[in-house]
Image (cartoon, rainbow, N blue to C red):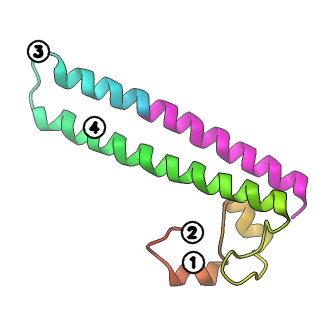
Amino acid sequence: MNEERARELLQAARAEAQAGLKYTEGSGREDRAAENDTGDIADPAQSLTAEGMDDAIAESLRDRLDALDRAEHRLGDGTYGRSVRSGLPIPDERLEADPAAELTVEEARQEPESGR
């Protein structure tokens, strides 16, 4: 994949993750405010569940931004598009689907808990 296309994909993925994080953090603030309201809440656990979901989504989006930072660093040092584990090339199709991919599909299947 050429550098220009990689930058374009990384920038688009970053904008999407940042927008999602901004929305999720706002939603989390609203959920916390609703919990503090003295209004009639049918199920107080509902707001706690929503807060937990917002927190989990925000954490996932922060992880995504970290992965994008690492990908941009690899782009700068000339290793973008290669597995961080083996150095094997990551196919362009995979990078189009996930511009922050750090492993080949085969390597990622070996690490289901990492999400890389």
- Quarter residue 85 falls in: bottom right
What residue would you read off at disc 1?
A: 108
Pointer 1 local density, CA inside 10 Å: few below 14, some 14–19, many at least 20? some
> What mark, if any, has residue 116 been given in the picture?
2
Q: Earlier in the sequence, mark 1 or mark 4?
A: 4
Q: Earlier in the sequence, mark 2 or mark 1?
A: 1
Q: Label 3 to label 2, Cα distance in Å?
A: 43 Å
Q: Label 2 to label 1, Cα distance in Å?
A: 6 Å
What residue would you read off at disc 4?
A: 51
Name the residue nearer the viewer: 6 or 92. 6
Q: Earlier in the sequence, mark 4 or mark 3?
A: 3
Answer with left or right where residue 61 lies relative to residue 96: left
Q: Secondary structure at mark 3?
A: loop
> What mark, if any, has residue 38 been given in the picture?
3
Tell me whether circle 2 and circle 1 mark residues in contact (CB < 8 Å). yes
Q: Label 4 amino acid? A: Glu
Q: Label 4 to label 2, Cα distance in Å?
A: 26 Å
The residue segment tinted magenta is 1-24
